[in-house]
Image (cartoon, coloured by chain):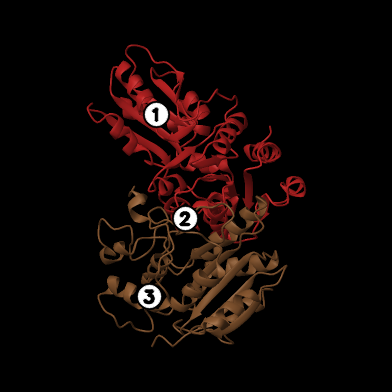
Chain colours: A red, B brown
Amino acid sequence: METMRERFVATASELLDDDPRLAVVLADITAAQFAPAATKHPGRVINVGIREQLLIGVAGGLALAGLRPLAHTFPSFLIERPFEQVKLDLGHQDVGAVLVSSGASYDMASMGRTHQAPGDVALLDTLDGWTIHVPGHPDEAEALLRDAAAAEGRVYVRLSGESNEEPRAVRPGRFAVAREGGAAAAGTVVAVGPMLDPVLRAVADLDVTVLYAATVRPFDAAALRRAVLRSAQADVVLVEPYLAGTSNREVDEALLDTPHRVLGIGVPREELRRYGTPAEHAAAHGLDAGALRQRIAAFLG
Amino acid sequence: MTNTTAIRCAHPTDYGYGDLGHLMALMTGDEKHSAAATSTLDVLWVLYDRVLRVDPHEPEALDRDRFVLSKGHGPMAYYAVLAAKGFISAKLLADFGSFDSPLGHHPDRVLVPGVEIGSGSLGHGLGLAVGIALGLRQRALHRSRVFTLLGDAELDEGSNHEAIAFAGAVGLDTLRAVVIDNVSATHGWSGGVATRFDREGWTTLTVDGRDHDAIEAAFAAARPGRPHAVVAVVEPKN
């Protein structure tokens, strides 16, 4: 299957043809794949080399000059390494940009900790005004990228090598009901991006409502409240493909007037120090369907 | 957001270079200023008085030159020049740094007309300026040049060297850097500040940072195909 990263290159290349405002900024990563687009649009595909502070600085400057920058590299080098540039060159300058990462929390399992960024969403969450998309399928990635490119604000699109079997019809900023629980539903499970398939397998024999989130900021509090108020218990399980608990605060704020419990499942803070494959990392983090079933069932009782 | 109509002056004033000390005193409360407080003053004055194509009536005109103050520390000289040139009202200076003032100890582009970037954290202006220059070129605003003011100690920040190498490699010839050299970098710059730009393909000139004609001539020495750096040497900070 085509990966989200491949779809990103194809979509961004098309958007460059259509939108003279768009400029892609790279720091060597994925530059080879953008070579045809760079030949067509030499002024709007800019590879700064392995210089991530400059990657974001240039994006900020392009925005100040009236363009719509789209900056891309691995999440560790896009969000973590140049974090102050993200904070100041985009946020403090009050300009918009699209940041597109590829690599997620452990796509590059065999590369080790240096190429893993489970904290990217939590870090961005300390800043004002970011929309954060976590697509679960290449089709969703394309739809969200197109939406982000056409928007004005600051948007992070977190692409992954992990993907659900089937795409969902995503409305940017809105959760979808992936599975409706019964009147006695034991709780609500929010599955983020590529976590949807393992979650659906995990809860196959449990009476729960499953919400699907391909956008986590803004957090669709209204959809969560609707689902929770329909369930027998105000219990919420968040399953996020990045740092565990990243969105717990959002759940608490959505249910401020409702006594509730929340379990945040995701990538633990502890460093794993293992190589191997993404599937092995998912299992080690308790994020495969079997482990998820156990954890969700134990929490919901 | 602060109401900018109250902030703007928007007309040329009668202030000249000789008034800058008084305008700064409105902020500092002292007519006598240390060399460090005025290290940028002459370069800023020459830029706004003789070099930059900017207009207080239209601080956001599309084809203006951009002046990017990277070294946002000690912006009193900057605000004094902006007031003298009519971008902001001199009445604002007395409240410098107060809660209701748009003029902080580091400038904020959102609050002050004519200020192109918010700065304060060192090492951000040159990267932003590279992006602005690339963007203006893409928009065919070829008349607009992008000037960035840095300090020699600010060059300690590695982000500058990412920008210096890249701008030189791609020949970003609408870009101008001016480095105020008051010998304040903790470990110095062996061979001089200009060598950092020279070796990456910039044209450079090192001048007396108090000599207005020399500063003006140094900016005029920019050549097609290469970014240009002016090192303006002033009295050592310590």
Amino acid bearing label 1: Asp
Question: In this rendering, do the residues under marks 3 and 2 share a single chain?
Answer: yes
Q: Residue at the front extreme? A: B14
Q: Position of residue A80 (x, y in %)?
A: 48, 55
Q: Nearer the viewer, residue A229 or A182?
A: A229
Q: CA distance from mark 1 to mark 2?
A: 44 Å
Which residue sits at x=43%, y=62%? B119
Considering the image in quadrants, where does the C terminus of chain A appear? top left
Q: Secondary structure at mark 2?
A: loop
Which residue sits at x=54%, y=58%? A57
Residue designated by label 3? B20
Which residue sits at x=52%, y=27%? A197
- Residue B28: which quarter of the image? bottom left
Q: Is residue A64 above or below residue A206?
A: below
- Residue A263: which quarter of the image? top left
Tag 2, which chain? B
Q: How many marks?
A: 3
Q: CA distance from mark 3 to mark 1?
A: 54 Å
Residue designated by label 2? B57
Q: Position of residue A130 (x, y in %)?
A: 44, 42
- Numbered mark located on residue A220 in the image: 1
Q: CA distance from mark 3 to mark 2?
A: 21 Å
